Image (cartoon, rainbow, N blue to C red):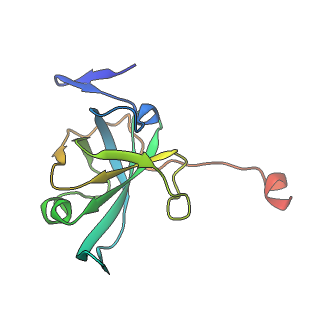
C-alpha cells in the first residue's frame, strides 16, 4: 500500500525492506546526530545519522556517508519533512540503532532528498508508553 503525494508514489516506512530496490518515503526528521569522522583500511570517511518518522507512525534510522554528508549535512534539519529515495536498505544493527524497525537506510552520493511541505499529520516525536509494572520486572 503506497500513498501518492505530489506525483510521488510514497511507501510507508513500515514496508521498507532490502527486497525493494526502488522506493520513496516522506518523513519528518525527529533526531540528528553529530557529524563524526572515522578511518578504516580504505581511508577516511564521515557520517551522520537521522531518525525518520512518517505519517503512519513508522520510524527508521538513516545514515549519510561521505558525499551524502557533503550534500545534506547543512540542509537536513530536525523537525522538517523530506521526500527521500535512492538509499540502500539493509538489516539494522540493533547495537547502534534505537529504532524498532528491522532495517535501516544508508545514503551515499546517489541519494535524492528534497524538502517537502510540512505535514501536520506527521508527529514530531514518537512515544512508546510502558506501564510501571512492566519496568519493575
How many numbered circles are shown?
0
Q: Quadrant of the C terminus?
A: bottom right
Q: In the displayed structure, does residue 108 sit left or right of residue 137?
A: left
The residue shown at (42%, 42%) is: 123
Q: Is residue 89 above or below residue 72?
A: above
Q: Residue furthest front?
A: 41
Q: Where residue 80 sits in the image (x, y, percent)?
A: 27, 50
Q: In the displayed structure, does residue 110 sit left or right of residue 136?
A: left
Relative depth, front residue between 119 and 44: 44
The residue shown at (27%, 60%) is: 64
The residue shown at (30%, 34%) is: 21
Quarter of the image holding residue 135? bottom right
Q: Is residue 20 above or below residue 33?
A: above
Q: Where residue 72 sits in the image (x, y, percent)?
A: 18, 59
Q: Where residue 99 sits in the image (x, y, percent)?
A: 51, 52
Relative depth, front residue between 29 and 68: 68
Relative depth, front residue between 39 and 102: 39
Q: Quadrant of the N terminus?
A: top left
Q: Where residue 13 sits in the image (x, y, percent)?
A: 41, 36
Amino acid at each position: 500500500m503506497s500513498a501518492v503525494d505530489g506525483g510521488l508514489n510514497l511507501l510507508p516506512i513500515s514496508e521498507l525492506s532490502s527486497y525493494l530496490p526502488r522506493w520513496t518515503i516522506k518523513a519528518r526528521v525527529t533526531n540528528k546526530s553529530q557529524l563524526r569522522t572515522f578511518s578504516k583500511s580504505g581511508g577516511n570517511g564521515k557520517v551522520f545519522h537521522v531518525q525518520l518518522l512518517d505519517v503512519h507512525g513508522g520510524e527508521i534510522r538513516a545514515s549519510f556517508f561521505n558525499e551524502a554528508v557533503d550534500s545534506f549535512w547543512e540542509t537536513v534539519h530536525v523537525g522538517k519533512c523530506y521526500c527521500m529515495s535512492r538509499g540502500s536498505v539493509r538489516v539494522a544493527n540493533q547495537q547502534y540503532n534505537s529504532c524498532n524497525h528491522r532495517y535501516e537506510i544508508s545514503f551515499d552520493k546517489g541519494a535524492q532528498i528534497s524538502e517537502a511541505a510540512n505535514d501536520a499529520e506527521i508527529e514530531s516525536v514518537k512515544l512508546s508508553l510502558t506501564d510501571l509494572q512492566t519496568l519493575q520486572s
